[in-house]
Image (cartoon, coloured by chain):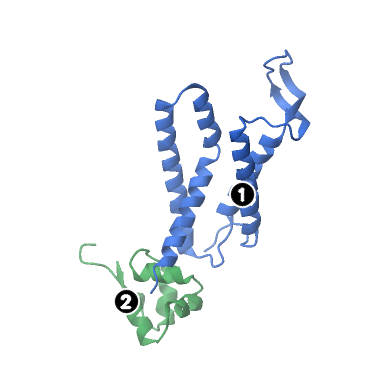
Amino acid sequence: MKNSIKVQRAIHDMTQADLASKIGVSRQSINAIEKNKYVPSTVLALKIAKLFNTTVEDIFFLEENE
Amino acid sequence: MQTNYLLPNKYKILGWVLFTIGLAFGIFLLLNEYESDLLNAKVLAIYYEGIFDSQDGFFKIINNNIVDELATICIIIGGLIVGFTKEKIEDEFIYKLRKDSLVWAIIVNYLILIFTIVFIYNMTFFHVLVLNMFTPLIFFIIRFNFLKFKSQNHEE
């Protein structure tokens, strides 16, 4: 699974730390998600989407072989 | 992340203190063949088999050096507290790191144990058994802190 959190952060002018504190996780978690090392739970995905005023599908998407 | 078995973060220091004291005494005892003259006390044994006396039986009050018991309990309680207290920011990612570390520790511990069962015998194996009381916790703590450290080092 890939995601566009980094792009969304740039659009909203947020650092990893800003995003992390807004949804109540550690900066390491955001970093791990952006690097595709950690797949967040549905709850966290929904929180991220809500914060960026968009849908989960716009932020997280499957890769071709998945 | 909802977890009901994690202690608040403030206990972490207490855990490290107990764990370190326990390990220091443990290593001291290991180097002295588990013998020390400090702290002899009368203790209750649920079942006791005397080696040199014929006091076998249930619920005996016996004399015992309790330094090794104290060290063992310090390591175990300290280790449990260190391993199972919340991080400053406890979230689902750290929860996953903790869980993965536990699985890793159990597998590595038993692989090493299998290796020692096959290649180590007699009194030397007794030392393995003693160390094996603590290695699952120790491997878990090392692995968990290593993964945490690794995730902190990947900057933006």
Compared to residue B56, the image places residue B105 above or below, namely: below
Identify the image quadrant of residue B151.
bottom left
Q: Mark 2 lies on which chain?
A: A
Marks 1 and 2, Cα distance to the nearest angstrom?
Answer: 44 Å
The answer to which of B65 and A35 lies nearer the viewer is: B65
Chain A, which colour?
green
Q: Can residue B98 be seen in this view?
A: no
Residue A4 marker: 2
Mark 1 vs mark 2, foreground winner is 1
Residue B146, image x, y percentages: 45, 56
Q: Please say if the residues under marks 1 and 2 sit with CB atoms less than 8 Å apart.
A: no
In this figure, which residue is indicated by the disc labeled 1? B20
Total marks shown come to: 2
Residue that extends furthest to the left in the rendered view of this protein: A64
Disc 1 is placed on an element classified as helix
Q: Which amino acid does label 2 sit on?
A: Ser
Residue at the (59%, 34%) spot, across then down: B31
From the rendered image, report the letter of the chain displayed in blue.
B
